[in-house]
Amino acid sequence: MKKKKFLGGKKTQPEIPPPDNSEEFESHESHDRRKRQTTTVPAAKDWTATAGVVGVPRNQGSCGCCWAFAANAALESAMVILQKKPLTAISEQELVDCSTQECEGGYMDQAYNYTKYHKISKMSSYSNAYASKRLTCKRPATTTTTAGACVSGWGYAMGINAARTAYVPDENALKEAVARQPVAVGIYVSDNFYKYAGGIFEDSTCSNTEINHGVVVVGYGTENGKDFWKVKNSWGSTWGEKGYIRMIRNAPNVCGIHRAPVYPITC
């Protein structure tokens, strides 16, 4: 099934592979209700409150590679939480240079597909510094010195329909996944999103069915009776709430945040 690029590129909805045709569905944990963990999910979670788990928000600049920043940010945190490794910055430039995706948009799961087969370099080990454009691929030989992270696969923090033929958006599934680790998601960015300066973001003009930007959910909570997602963006630390935005949760319009959430499975 050919995919149209969307995150950072065209405003189209990604095609999530059907569960029964997805190796991640069969070989890794699924988020349908029959397989969810029985442990209690906390009412609130903020991975940024734990030192050394979430890196500082970086800036993608003019390159439409939000997919690379979102995928790497979730993976950096997963290596800390699941593999007990120190927080290590990994290279977005390697993904832009060496994968099949670049500055015209892409997918986080395809970033993990690249990392599954090649691993990914520490930012300090990759020859090209981030340049906000595609450069010549300079992927180093994979060693324990150069590799910053690896994945064995990925999963979708979504529900499964009764026929087990399709994933379905499910904020509860996303919440349960975020309770375990930060999750890369797609959202719809409207004009109002660019102007965000603080508070819980609600926007009736954003699409709840299309997504055009990749970010990372690093927590969730409630303030003054409103549920929210805490989201790490890739527009630097001067945007929003020091690089983050709190987006409305459990509302009729959540700007598509539940439509394509993907998390890395570390190796």
Image: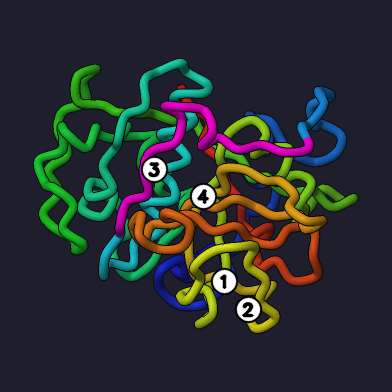
The residue at which mark 2 appears reads as 206
Q: Find the distance from the CA under tag 4 to the CA under tag 2.
A: 18 Å
| SS at mark 4 in the image | strand
Residue toward you, 244 or 27:
244
- First to last magenta residue range: 43-59
Residue count near mark 4 (Cα–Cα under 10 Å), binned few <14, some 14–19, many ≥20? many
Q: Are marks 2 and 1 in contact (CB under 8 Å)?
A: yes
Mark sitting earlier along the chain (4/2): 2
The percent position of residue 65, horizontal first and vertical second, equals 34, 61
Q: For the point 82% across and 48% down, which residue is it?
A: 164
Mark sitting earlier along the chain (3/2): 3
The residue at which mark 1 appears reads as 188
Residue toward you, 81 or 163:
81
| SS at mark 1 in the image | loop
Mark sitting earlier along the chain (2/1): 1
Q: Main secondary structure of the magenta part?
A: loop
Indicate the amino acid at tag 1.
Answer: Tyr
Indicate the amino acid at tag 3.
Answer: Asn
The numbered disc on residue 232 is none
The residue at which mark 3 appears reads as 72
Q: Are marks 4 and 2 in contact (CB under 8 Å)?
A: no
Q: Is residue 167 visible?
A: no
| SS at mark 3 in the image | helix
Q: Is residue 79 above or below residue 255?
A: above
The residue at which mark 4 appears reads as 216
Q: Find the distance from the CA under tag 3 to the CA under tag 4.
A: 9 Å
Q: Find the distance from the CA under tag 4 to the CA under tag 1.
A: 13 Å
In the rendered structure, the answer to whether residue 140 lies left or right of residue 77 reads left
Q: Find the distance from the CA under tag 1 to the CA under tag 3.
A: 20 Å
Indicate the amino acid at tag 2.
Answer: Cys
